[in-house]
Image: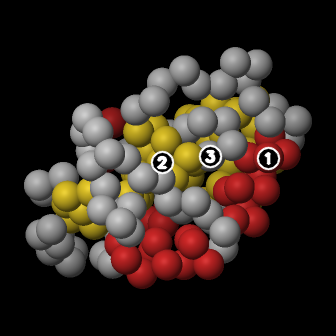
Amino acid sequence: MLGDRLVFPVLLSKDLAASRAFYHDMLGLEILREDEERLIVRCGAGSQVLITKSTIGTADLQTQLAWRVPDLRAELAELRARGVKIESYVAPDPVTDADGIADMGYAWAAWIIDPSGNALAIIQPKVQPAAG
């Protein structure tokens, strides 16, 4: 039942116009639907991200969603070319290198922050999942 169903993250936005510019213009995600209360963007394999209007946004500094990619450095280069800032962390954890990449043990990871303060990760597993 639920184990066979797609899920989608819901992010909070204090400014839907700024979120639209970030997710569509900067990240290049296709807009599936939008109105004055929400924005839905398409990601890979049928997944979606719902960005919903909020008066307070998020107060959580933890990662809100993550994309799994086969080549993290290539993804970061493309994001930088689009003007997206890659976060840099020195302590306590994670610690990123000069390219904004952290070694998480099981994967390499980097983070970007959307206009409402949502932390978004891009992760490259060290062992790639089998094609299936």
The image shows residue 119 at horizontal and vertical percentages of 49, 42
> With respect to residue 113, does 25 lie above or below?
below
- Which residue position holds label 3? 114
**On the image, numbered disc 1 is attached to which residue?**
18
N-terminal-most mark, 2 or 3: 3
Question: Residue 111, relative to residue 57: is it above or below?
Answer: below
Q: Are marks 2 and 3 in contact (CB under 8 Å)?
A: yes
- The residue nearer to you, when weighing 64 against 61, is 61
Residue 36 percent location from the top left of the image:
88, 36
User: Mark 1 is on which residue type?
Assistant: Ala
Give 30 or 13, whichever is nearer the viewer. Answer: 13
Relative to 54, 45 lies left or right:
left
Relative to residue 33, is residue 26 depicted above or below? below
75 and 69: which one is in front?
Answer: 75
Residue 88 in the image: x percent, y percent?
A: 42, 53
Q: SS at mark 2?
A: strand
Report whether 59 appears left or right of 55. Answer: left
Label 2: few (<14), some (14–19) or many (≥20) C-alpha neighbours in 10 Å: some
Q: Residues within 10 Å of mark 1 (few under 14, many from 20)?
A: some
Which residue was labeled with disc 2?
120
Is 117 situated left or right of 112 in this image? right
